[in-house]
Amino acid sequence: MSNDPRYPIGKWKEQPPTEAAQLIDQIAAAPASLAAAVKGLTEQQLDTPYRDGGWTPRQIVHHIADSHMNAYIRFKLGMTEDNPTVKPYNEKLWAETIDGKTAPVAVSLSLVENVHARWVHFLRTLDSTALARKVMHPENGPMALTDLLNLYAWHGRHHTAHIAGLRQQNGW
C-alpha cells in the first residue's frame, strides 16, 4: 500500500512473470469490484474527485472502459500480428471528453463487464508461448503479453482503490 493517493496500491512496475492464471482471475474479477466500488454513490459523489486534481469516480469508470477496450485490442494484435505497434492514446484528454465527464456509469460498467468477459475467455486460451509474444508500445518499448497481463491486472485494482479510498475518506 502507498500513502500517495495517486497510487493507493503502489506504482505499476514490470515484474517477473506471475502465474498467468492468477492475473487472469484478477482481470475477471475487476468488473464486479468496480461495480461494487461505485454502488450506491449519488450523482454528486460520482462527480467528486478522489484527490485535488484527480479524476472523479465517474471518470475513473469510463477510463477503465476506454483503457480495457484498448487492452483487449492490444492482446488481439499481439496474437495475430508479429510485433505490432500498438497505438497509445491521451487518457487524460479522453477523461475530459463530455462522455467521460457526464455519461451514466452504468453504460461503462456494462461495457467493462462485457469486454472483460470476452477478454478473459480469450486470455484463458493463451499458453506461455503465446504470452511471450511481444507488442511494440511507442512510449514503453517492447512489451510481452505477460507484461500487459501484469499491467492490466494492476490497472483495474489501482483505479478501484481510488474509488474505495474516496469512499473511506468521506465516510460513504
Image (cartoon, grey):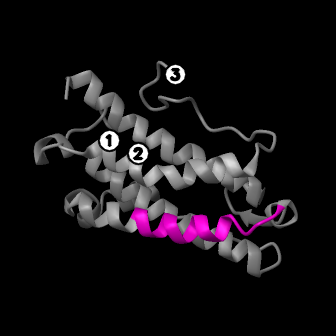
Q: Is residue 21 magenta?
A: no
Name the residue: 60% across, 50% down.
25
In this rendering, position of residue 75 left or right of residue 66: right
Residue 141 placement (x, y as % from top left): 76, 57
Identify the amino acid type marked 3: Ser
Residue labelled with disc 1: 37
Q: Is residue 154 left or right of residue 146?
A: left
> Circle 1: is it few (<14), some (14-19), or many (20+) Cα within 10 Å?
many
From the viewer's perspective, tell me whether residue 83 is left or right of residue 89.
right
Picture layout, residue 130 above or below residue 29: below
Q: Are marks 3 and 1 in contact (CB under 8 Å)?
A: no
Kindly report the distance in space between the C-alpha atoms of the residues bearing marks 3 and 1.
19 Å
The residue closer to the viewer here, 25 or 159, is 25
Question: Looking at the image, is mark 3 or mark 2 earlier in the sequence?
Answer: 3
Q: Amino acid at mark 2?
A: Ser
Task: Find disc 2 in the rendering and name its residue.
Answer: 33
Task: Give the residues drawn in magenta, as a range.
Answer: 112-127
- Residue 96 lies in what quarter of the image? bottom left
Residue under the point 67% across and 54% down = 149
Which residue was labeled with disc 3?
A: 2
Q: Residue at x 41, y 27 (%)?
A: 5
- Main SS, magenta region, reads helix
